[in-house]
Amino acid sequence: MRKGAKRKRSQKEEEAAPAPAPAPAPDNHKTTESTKPPTRAKRVKASKPESEPEYFEDQRNLEDLWKQIFPVGTEWDQLDKVYGFNWNFSNLENAFEEGGVLHGKTVYLFGCTEPQLVPFKGDNILIYIPAVVAIVSPFPPSDKIGIKSVQREVEEIIPMKQMKMDWVPYIPLEDRESRVDRLRHQIFILSCTQRRAALKHLKIDRIKKYEYCLPYFYNPLQEDELEQSTEVPIIFPAEPKPVFCEFDWELDELQEFIDKLIQEEELSEDQKDAFKEFVKEKVREAKKANREAKEARRKALEEMSEGTRQAIENQRFYKFYPVQTPDTPDISKCEGIIYKQVLWEGS
């Protein structure tokens, strides 16, 4: 017997451990065979082959920029379709790099969509193509939203915040671990805090307003150079259908205008007097609006500082469409799609 103290075992270990081999007998004695059954060898599990490592491309610093921008004027129920494709706006991202048109400048961005019938995977499908408009400006180019549709006689101009919209700073991916108050923001995006889940509590007219929104840009330096319009949009509530037309108070003679509508069966004879008064009232409203706009421009120019004037003169508008990739539709042949260009210059 071997010297040394025996280690205690738990009952479970006793049962699981194999029986000890018998001690060797002296040479002058016969060896005896153990009566205990032989223990089974433990089954060794085969090791799984190591899988190939997966590699993921690093995210670009501005890769999610276009997705963070609110696509103003887009129907709420179409937003999921806009993001259904992995659109690539690397051209917009590159514009912020050294040598790009937006590099080192303070830029304000808003999004929009353009529905187009586009061939994709053998079918022609209606796609809401996203676009991003960039405005180079040292201060917010507008705090107003214009709401205009076929059903509305005049464009409604309201504060952005009334539609829960505002310009907010965009933080690039590489800066998102930094303290926001220490960052020097150069990119601002149009954001909307209206929650889609809360739309069911809004009135239909309020929801529809979002579909007809576009940022309203007012440039007092150029308004005086443009000839003020003398056309008035007319939507006359006639029976059995409304009369849609435009009346020019300088070029059109009202009675001849009415007679032509009656001849074309757009207006009934018994409604001509009411229509005449309706048009006269719309002309008075339009002339008053023109006078007020001219006075507002004159006052704005008088109060404008030289710095503000120069900033407006140096404003630039650029428009970006997504670049072609293998997994997105080819929009290069779509009507009206013009890649990056200066849309409007202040000077």
Image (cartoon, grey):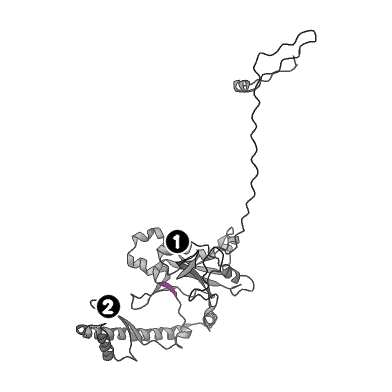
Which disc is residue 305 wearing? Answer: none
Q: What residue would you read off at disc 1?
A: 80
Looking at the image, the residue that sits furthest to the top is 28
Amino acid type of the residue tagged 1 in the rendering:
Asp
Q: Which residue is mark 2?
A: 242
Q: Nearer the viewer, residue 141 or 324?
A: 324
Q: Is residue 96 left or right of residue 203?
A: right
- Please tell me whether residue 214 belongs to the stretch shown in magenta: yes
Q: Position of residue 175 (x, y in %)?
A: 59, 61
Tell me the element at label 1: helix
Residue placed most toward the observer, 250 or 128: 128
Q: Is residue 292 above or below residue 32?
A: below
Residue sitting at x 32%, y 90%:
252
Quarter containing the N terminus: top right
> Is 42 on the left or on the right of 115, as rendered?
right
Graded by Cα atoms within 10 Å as few (under 14), some (14 to 19) or many (20 or more), the crowding at tag 1 reads few
Q: Is residue 199 above or below residue 335?
A: above
Residue lying at the far left of the rendered structure: 270
Specify the amino acid type for callout 2: Pro
- Residue 16 covered by magenta stretch: no
Q: Which residues are magenta?
A: 212-218
Judge whether residue 162 can be spotted in this image.
no
Q: What percent of the width, then of the height, locates residue 78?
A: 42, 64
Furthest residue to the right? 27
x, y percent for residue 111 = 48, 69
Cα gap from disc 2 to disc 1, whole angstroms: 35 Å
Secondary structure at badge 2 equals loop
